[in-house]
Amino acid sequence: MLSGDAAFVALVAADAGLDTATYRKWAVEQINYILGDNNYGISYQIGFGSKYPRSPHHRSASCPDRPAPCTEANLHASGPSPQLLVGAIVGGPGKDDSYKDNREDYVHNEVACDYNSGFQSALAGLTHLVNTKELPAIPAPKCHG
């Protein structure tokens, strides 16, 4: 989910004085999209809200509880992962905004440092804006069911 990275870059640019209001507003909208303000009402952050990915492409999440062995077959098993990676961001939707929660689709369901670090950095930037009372006023996220 590179939109978290882009949101962070937008916040850095805004902090440097580049079209501050526009970039801050856009960054908030990107984070809202990641967290569920999108066409599917799905949060791409595992464990956030009631609708989020259950089958990330992640070996450890695919493993059964111990002492059961974890094998390559677990990574390719269908259905929800036995372990919940609360807080992790998956790759997210394609260019056409489509998304399917399928562990075998590593492009859209991979949990990776580059997605998660940008997202966390953008959240830190937004928290700073909240604390300094500079968070832009934007419409409330749409409710999806």
Image (cartoon, rainbow, N blue to C red):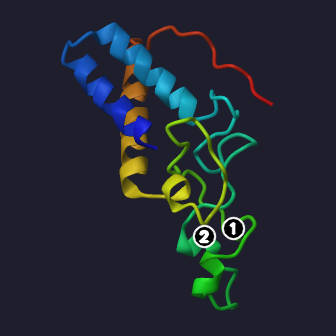
Residue at image position (39%, 34%) is: 122
Q: Farthest left residue?
A: 16
Residue at image mark 1: 81
Q: Is residue 6 above or below residue 58?
A: above
The quadrant of the rendering that contains the C terminus is: top right
Q: Position of residue 106 (x, y in %)?
A: 52, 61
- Disc 1 and disc 2 in contact, CB within 8 angstroms: yes
User: In the image shown, does 14 or 96 lie closer to the viewer?
Assistant: 96
Q: Is residue 114 left or right of residue 142?
A: left
Q: Is residue 132 left or right of residue 59?
A: left
Q: Position of residue 63 (x, y in %)?
A: 64, 78
Question: Considering the numbered disc 1 on the image, is that residue within a helix, a strand or a loop?
Answer: loop
Q: Quadrant of residue 83?
A: bottom right
Amino acid carrying label 1: it is Ser
Residue at image position (23%, 22%) is: 13
Q: Farthest right residue?
A: 145
Question: Considering the numbered disc 2 on the image, is that residue within a helix, a strand or a loop?
Answer: helix
Tell how many labels. Answer: 2
Q: CA distance from mark 1 to mark 2?
A: 6 Å
Q: Position of residue 14 (x, y in %)?
A: 27, 17
User: In the image shown, does 124 or 21 lie closer to the viewer?
Assistant: 21
Q: Is residue 41 above or below residue 139?
A: below
Binning the other alpha carbons within 10 Å of mark 2 as few (below 14), some (14 to 19) or many (20 upward) gives some
Q: Quadrant of residue 44?
A: top right
User: In the image shown, does 71 or 16 lie closer to the viewer?
Assistant: 71
Q: Is residue 54 above or below residue 29?
A: below
Residue at image position (63%, 84%) is: 73
Residue at image mark 2: 61
Residue at image position (41%, 23%) is: 27
Amino acid carrying label 2: it is Ala
Q: Farthest front residue?
A: 96
